[in-house]
Image (cartoon, rainbow, N blue to C red):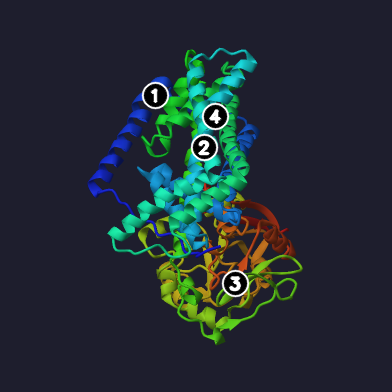
Amino acid sequence: MSDPSPMTVPAVRAPGRRRLILGLVAAALIAVAFVALFPALADYSDIWDDIRSIAPVTLGVLTLLAIGHQLINPLMTMAVIPDLTYRHALVARLASTAAANTIPGGGAIGVGITYVMLGRWGHPGPQIGAAVALTGVWNNLVKLLLPVVALAGALITGLSMPDLVDATLIGASAMLVVMMVAIAVARSGLRHRVLGPVERLVARVRRAFRKGAPPPEGSPVTEFFAAVGTALGTRWRHMLLATLAAHVSLYLVLLACLRAIGGDSTGVAWPEVLAGFSIIRLVSAIPVTPGGLGVAELGLTGIIAAGMDEPGVEMVAAAVLLFRLFTYLVPTILGGVVAIGWQRSKNKSKGAARWGLDDVPPEHLEDAVCFRCRVPGVERWDLDPFALVDCPSCGQAFMSPRLNEAGRTALYGNAKYFDDGVYRSKGAESMQRRWSAGRLDLIQRHLDDRPAPRVFEVGCAYGMFLEAARDRGFELGGLEYSAIAARTATERLGVPIHVGEVMSLAPSGDWDAVAFWDVIEHVPDPGAFLHAVAGLTRPGGVIAFSCPNFDSWPARLLRTRWWTLKPHKHIWHYRKHDLRTMLGEAGMQPITMIRSPLRRANWVRVDSLVAVARKPG
């Protein structure tokens, strides 16, 4: 592979006024589509009733189909760049899709995101350019092929679709001509005839700007065409199959949504659905609105539901909106989260500065062993000066080296740790209050009715959760490792807050609930920690806690770029089964583990879980 730095692509920015006008026009078109035109086809309340009537099992199948489509999408780029890893291809695909779906002219920005991401992962610019170009060409070729397939399906099933014949003939002819010419040029001496004029033009431009001759190993244009030729000459079948799979899987999501809502009662055969799908895929190539928003929904509903009565149109409209939820809204949100996480991690420096620290003194580091098996771990990721390792016996993930007691005291003993964290702004505090309310609801749901239940919080910081509990009539108790935070919480609550670690407290066994929110990943020995917490809890009482979820999709997808990795703070990273095992070893019975970001106790936290367990008795 040649120079791993990405090919320099000059930034082309539309003037601010033009960009504003394009954004306003797109917003107006989307508003007209959803506020004026779509309600004329079907009432939103009736559509919502149709969607709510879908059985959970059917909804699960639709979700799996939509996930399958997203997992297929990166294969096209991988077909052009064979040494591109699947994870990198998926991240780049999701991030570029989010840009294309939300910003006027976002397709160009999506291409830029692809260049930047793949370039940072070591792929040369000409190869990335070839992947972008070939992906676009093959996508459009398959869009031209889809009417052919729809017409063939109509002939097989005996349907009459004369309006599709002309489009089919044009599409098939164009596709065959382009494919034959491209492959012939790439695989023969004609390639040099194509490259010659291009190279001469580039040379003139370079001379005009006094750039001199291209480097002896070849210009970026030469390398770009070489990459295109190599891909077409050796992997054109892979590209065709990957692109077909992406389009077919997207069509299957639409067909499944129609069948899930209307079954066969809509009377729409699969070739008719494919015909409407293929026409809208062609139309969506024109970037009227970002991601075809508004245009796709109106077009699909209008074409598929043509000639139907009102109930039929309503069911088709509901299916189309459900389809767009799965294939537009969810991937856009997911891609935005992935892009933000990648950007945040990209901006961090190497070494300790990457984690927001000054240089970590060697005397503040220590090697660690698995708290359960008492054996050193096997390195998974180097996170200089830390490392994430896995226990070779039980698989528990943990940091080694990690901060020792002196390092933890220096970190948590500084008020900046709290002031720049959950108390950094009114918005952050508002989110804390929302979580506190949801978590108190959860605790009260699993406690028997008592006139004044008692709750003890370990790691209470400035006391916001305990303040919310007091407002609900709880008796309070708390402990905080940081003396500064404990003093602030004591003043805030009027209740003495202990300072230190929970293992230093006597096992009173008289608290109805013991809570520790985002704490158990910080402690040096979580096994001893849970036993101490169980010692504080009365028989029949509950413990409730939250922590990062190492099984979450951000953790799996972003890996060392996961924003919650934080190796200087988070010593242990747990999966669901790790927590169940730990709770059982501490004599606690798990009741529930919430991972949904839609639950108030875990609101918008896509990489976290909230758990409740009971002490038998």
* Left or right: where 185 falls relative to 587: left
Q: Amino acid at mark 2?
A: Val
In the picture of the structure, the residue carrying the numbered disc 4 is 145
* Structural distance between the alpha carbons of marks 1 and 4: 33 Å
* Left or right: where 381 falls relative to 197: right
- Work out whether mark 4 precedes mark 3 in sequence or the reverse, and give the earlier one: 4
- Work out whether mark 2 precedes mark 3 in sequence or the reverse, and give the earlier one: 2
- Residue at (60%, 67%) from the top-left corner? 520
* Structural distance between the alpha carbons of marks 3 and 1: 55 Å
Cβ atoms under marks 4 and 3 closer than 8 Å: no
* Structural distance between the alpha carbons of marks 2 and 3: 48 Å
Frontmost of labels 1 and 2 is 2
In the picture of the structure, the residue carrying the numbered disc 1 is 39
Q: Amino acid at mark 3?
A: Asp
| Residue 239 x/y as whole percent | 59, 43
Frontmost of labels 4 and 3 is 4
* Structural distance between the alpha carbons of marks 4 and 3: 47 Å
For label 1, the crowd category at 10 Å Cα-Cα, with few meaning under 14, some 14 to 19 and many 20 or more, is: some
Frontmost of labels 3 and 1 is 3
Q: Amino acid at mark 1?
A: Pro
In the picture of the structure, the residue carrying the numbered disc 2 is 181
In the picture of the structure, the residue carrying the numbered disc 3 is 382
Q: Quadrant of residue 467?
A: bottom left
- Work out whether mark 1 precedes mark 4 in sequence or the reverse, and give the earlier one: 1
For label 4, the crowd category at 10 Å Cα-Cα, with few meaning under 14, some 14 to 19 and many 20 or more, is: many
